[in-house]
């Protein structure tokens, strides 16, 4: 996919018309080929864009407006339906281009497996990379029912690549006992149930490092985000997630890319989930893009 190709669909509010002038590139990864429960996250990026039209352009949290950041909405990567390996390869190639242009990659999923090739691409550019992962689930399986390409495996894959001690998971409340045991024995940081307070303790230890942030919308309680593939009771509030995004924005770290995944709009006729996702992305753009 070339960046000079015209994207004819809806774009995220205040998207800059020029890729060349942009500081960040927003893109969709419409894939849900490996989900184990409810499919539909491939429709997430398009619906988030539509919902963004209802956003205020000003963030009272950060006292910034979207027009202050030049970001380009490149549209959705045209992933081949059902072909997980080819889709992963295409995502990695796409993000390689963004990084080679010196821009901040900000992805919209799609299932969480889509974050794996992005993190892999970012690691190639930043070998001292750390990962901040917010999720209801550990995502530390080696495979799911014999399939290594699964949305339950991306954090295990990146931990194996960059070292478990460089991966920090927050909000976790679901996973196999073996996954938690592996993380503990490997020295990986997992904070159960909460995000903001344990995040505050970890961020000073990452001072000066490049950090990639991957957020699964199901870190939120289903009351706040019912439109996702694998809902899990007992999650955090949208207020806590927003505060966590702002905490990262104020920390002495280099955010070098991010994604927000697993938004499955068809399970939420109220459109609460896509509206929440668009607001989260606004705060990520305003808070993180300048932190490179």
Image: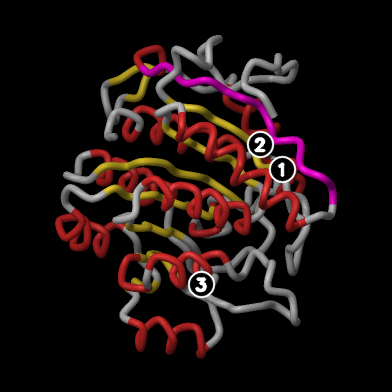
Q: Provide the residue designation for mark 3.
A: 156
Q: Is residue 288 above or below residue 248?
A: above
Circle 3 crowding by C-alpha within 10 Å: few under 14, some 14–19, many from 20:
many
Task: For marks 1 and 3, give the CA distance.
Answer: 22 Å
Please identify, in this view, whether the residue under mark 1 or under mark 3 is nearer the observer.
3
- In percent of the image, x 32 and y 50: which residue is there? 211
Q: Secondary structure at mark 2?
A: helix
Quarter the N terminus occupies: top right
Q: Position of residue 24 (x, y in %)?
A: 44, 26
Q: Secondary structure at mark 1?
A: loop
Q: Provide the residue designation for mark 2.
A: 45
Which residue occupies the foreground of this view, 189 or 60?
Answer: 189
Q: Provide the residue designation for mark 1.
A: 30
> Residue 143 falls in which quadrant of the image?
bottom right
Q: Which mark is residue 234?
A: none
Which residue occupies the foreground of this view, 57 or 288?
Answer: 288
Tell which circle, 3 or 2, labels the residue nearer the N-terminal end.
2
Circle 1 crowding by C-alpha within 10 Å: few under 14, some 14–19, many from 20:
many
> Quick check: marks 2 and 1 in contact, CB under 8 Å?
yes
């Amino acid at each position: 996919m070339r960046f000079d190709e015209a994207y004819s669909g809806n774009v995220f509010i205040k998207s800059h018309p020029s890729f060349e002038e942009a500081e960040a590139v927003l893109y969709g990864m419409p894939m849900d080929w490996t989900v184990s429960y409810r499919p539909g996250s491939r429709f997430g990026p398009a619906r988030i864009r539509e919902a963004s039209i209802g956003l205020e352009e000003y963030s009272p949290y950060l006292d910034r407006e979207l027009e202050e950041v030049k970001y380009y909405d490149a549209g959705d990567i045209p992933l081949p339906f059902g072909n997980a390996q080819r889709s992963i390869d295409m995502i990695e190639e796409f993000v390689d281009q963004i990084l080679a242009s010196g821009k901040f990659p900000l992805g919209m999923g799609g299932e969480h497996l889509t974050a794996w090739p992005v993190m892999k691409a970012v690691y190639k550019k930043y070998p001292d990379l750390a990962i901040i992962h917010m999720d209801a689930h550990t995502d530390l399986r080696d495979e799911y029912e014999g399939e290594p390409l699964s949305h339950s495996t991306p954090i295990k894959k990146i931990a194996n690549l960059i070292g478990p001690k460089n991966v920090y998971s927050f909000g976790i409340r679901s996973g196999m006992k073996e996954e938690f045991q592996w993380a503990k024995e490997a020295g990986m940081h997992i904070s159960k149930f909460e995000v903001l307070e344990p995040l505050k303790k970890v961020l000073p230890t990452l001072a000066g490092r490049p950090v990639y942030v991957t957020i699964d919308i199901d870190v939120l309680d289903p009351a706040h985000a019912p439109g996702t593939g694998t809902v899990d009771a007992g999650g955090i509030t949208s207020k806590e997630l927003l505060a966590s995004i702002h905490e990262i924005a104020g920390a002495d770290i280099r955010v070098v890319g991010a994604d927000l995944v697993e938004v499955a709009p068809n399970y939420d006729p109220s459109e609460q989930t896509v509206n929440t996702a668009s607001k989260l992305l606004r705060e990520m753009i305003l808070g993180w893009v300048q932190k490179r």
